[in-house]
Amino acid sequence: GIKLGLYLLKKEAEGPLPSCWNELARTYDEIEQLFDRLQRIYQSESLTLVRSPLGELIIERLPLWRSRYGKRGRTILIDPPAEDVPGDFDPMHFGLGLDAFVAWRAESGDSIQPRLAWRVTGDCFEICWQESHPATNDLDESATGSLRSQPSDSTQSLALLLLARVAASHGGELETRNDPALGITLRWPQFRERQ
């Protein structure tokens, strides 16, 4: 109802709308995104597993992720395995979780070059994301100020919960650390028994 009302208001308005109406529309969009992310985190997921190398998913999404970081003069470094072996995972769910996580870190992180690595360790897939804090003496004050920003949307921090949910639905886990910058490791079984 609210969305329809905002749409009709814009359509029927004569002349430009007051800025408070634009702010109302942005706030409503944030509320809608919050509920959408909460549903993704808490709803039961039915996985569509494919057997594929994990690198295919990462390389496919990397241009989008780098474009998010490139807006502020940064990039994502990748550390691929020597051999990208296949395993079982749902690329749609992992893609959404990783997209949300990278978008959140691009907006709220201050790492210039986070490192993304993936590999098979034992019988598990593993994805590692490690940020590093820029040395303050390596950057002038204006550059440091441009790196530190507030998230444009307060629901983006839910991305970590979404990613943890995706890992759990694959029988895995998400580990976080701050040493001194944010690092995460996702692990889940490389192969899933067919039922």
Image (tube, helix red, strand yellow):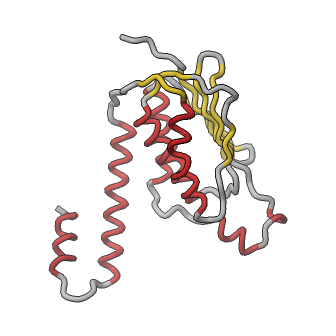
The answer to which of 143 and 33 lies nearer the viewer is 143
Q: Position of residue 194 (x, y in %)?
A: 39, 12
Specify the quadrant of the image occupied by residue 107.
bottom right
Task: Please report the residue visible at 41 percent of the width from the left and 36 percent of the height from the top.
Answer: 93
Task: Please report the residue visible at 72 percent of the width from the left and 70 percent of the height from the top.
Answer: 143
The answer to which of 6 and 189 lies nearer the viewer is 189
Against 96, is 25 above or below? below
Against 126, is 135 above or below? below
Against 140, is 17 above or below? below
Q: Position of residue 109 (x, y in %)?
A: 62, 56
Against 58, is 151 above or below? below
Q: Position of residue 96 (x, y in %)?
A: 43, 42
Q: Position of residue 153 (x, y in %)?
A: 46, 61
Task: Answer with left or right where residue 86 lies relative to residue 21.
Answer: right
Specify the quadrant of the image occupied by residue 162.
top left
Task: Answer with left or right where residue 41 lies relative to residue 143.
Answer: left
Task: Please report the residue visible at 42 percent of the width from the left and 30 percent of the height from the top.
Answer: 90
* Quarter that holds the C terminus: top left
Specify the quadrant of the image occupied by residue 129.
top right
- Give the total of numbered labels: 0
Residue lying furthest bottom: 15
* Quarter that holds the N terminus: bottom left
Task: Please report the residue visible at 63 percent of the width from the left and 23 percent of the height from the top.
Answer: 120
